[in-house]
Image (cartoon, coloured by chain):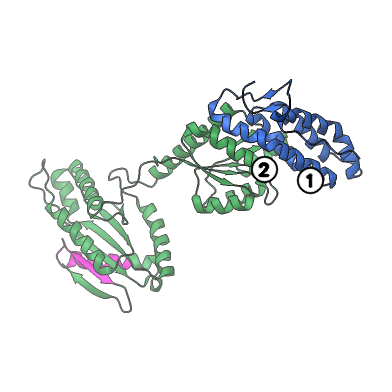
Chain colours: A green, B blue
Amino acid sequence: MTPTTTPKPADDTRPTVLIIDDSDDVHRLLRVRLRSEELEFISAHGGAEGLEKVARHSPSLIILDLDMPDVDGLDVLRRLKAESATQDIPVIVLSGQHTPQDKVVAFDLGAIDYVTKPFELTELRVRVRSALRMQQLVQMLAQRAQIDGLTGLWNRAFFDRRWEEEHNRSARHAHPVSVALLDLDHFKLVNDTFGHPVGDAVLQTVGKVLQRESRQSDLACRYGGEEFALLMPDTSCADAEKVCQRIRAAVEDARWTRTPDLRVTVSIGVAGGGDAAALSPGEWVEAADRSLYSSKRSGRNRVVATDLSGHPPRLVRAG
Amino acid sequence: MPTPTKAQVPDAHPNPHPLVSDYSADPDMAELITLFATELPGRLDVIAQACRERDLVTAARIAHQLRGASAGYGFPAIGIVAGRVEDGLRAAHPDPASALDSVRSTLDELAALCRRVVPGPA
């Protein structure tokens, strides 16, 4: 069993730089002169090719010429900044056109820097480094905004967005998908009996159990105070139920060194199946919530799974 | 209308004033400088052919590329002269013949400069 859907640290692979320029010289020179920066380079020799490669490779940085015969650089820049998938990729304009007006237009369209040709190597190198450093900081900030500070899991906002995307994908391709809602049993009692620091430790530990016991493709989130969610793409209800049973058992088996009397259990509701198109994302989560409610009503510390494939939904397993 | 002279292969004839790259001592650049020097005659031929055909757009585009790239290979002087060629071709003229007339001497200067290029250290 492979772990986990831990939010990844800032990407430590080599940044990818896409060079969009119709001059072979620029591609050659940049690849050699920036070799020491440990970058991966992709070349595009025109605006149209550049746009296609941006979509395919999602580079960390784009170096863009303005004067190109097919689609000119300003048009490429305009299109990049108009698309949500590409608007945050930093663009350095590298151009022989250097009137103030050219620069104003480029910056207004969203370029983060403007280097004139012929470029001075040291200057270009530090501007590339600066752009990549800024991009890494922006990504880290964005990631931090989507992470729950206590458990290190993705937060509710991230889950809601990713669930909607995954639901749409599953509906489009008729792939199965499952969602589980997990709620700690008698958590208020844990806080009241042992104190909130212990309560926080319980939440952190359950978060780690989720990361450890779920699969690489799953997405574990803190959904609320003592509630968690697990998104399982390409997973049938039956398989999702197995994953959740594993999690339930691991939580029950956890031992608390500093509070030996503490016992923690979790109730889990699963909604899964191969018919994502039949229900909206919200209806799907409601079905998982009803399964969770059934789990609580039938004694807690159990998994209740509802298979949403076909109609009407049928209870797969309780226990 | 006289056409620009065809560039000679730099190392095929005595070259009393060789033009050496500013980066000739940089081993990383050796291969690129050799490539640039080898390709130069061909680029000048393209400009010459474009001028013969009154194709100012192509001539200006090649001059533009030389303008932007030459300094990167360590030949800023070529870039400066190529820039004058480009500006001359792109400037407003009553007809292509006038445009070509205006850059004739600059094209000769460019070709002469390029003939002096040697890929290795002086």
Residue B49 is at least partly visible in this image: yes
Q: Residue furthest left?
A: A261
- The percent position of residue B67, horizontal first and vertical second, equals 71, 34
Quadrant in the picture for residue A152: top left
Image quarter (top left, top right, bottom left or bottom right) of the N terminus of chain A: bottom left
Residue at the image position 29 percent from the left and 58 percent from the top: A230
Near-viewer residue (A46 or A203): A46
* Nearer the observer, A187 or A9: A9
Q: Chain of mark 2?
A: A
Instruction: Specify start and end residues of the magenta stretch as a single range.
Output: A286-307
**Which numbered circle lies on residue A66?**
2
Q: Position of residue B102 (x, y in %)?
A: 88, 35
- Which percent across, then down, holds residue B45? 76, 41
* Residue type for callout 1: Val
Q: The residue tagged with tag 1: helix, strand or loop?
A: helix
Label 1 lies in what chain?
A: B
Residue B57 got which mark? 1
Kind of residue sitting beneath label 2: Leu
Residue B88 falls in image quadrant: top right
In the displayed structure image, the side of residue A275 where residue B1 appears, left or right: right
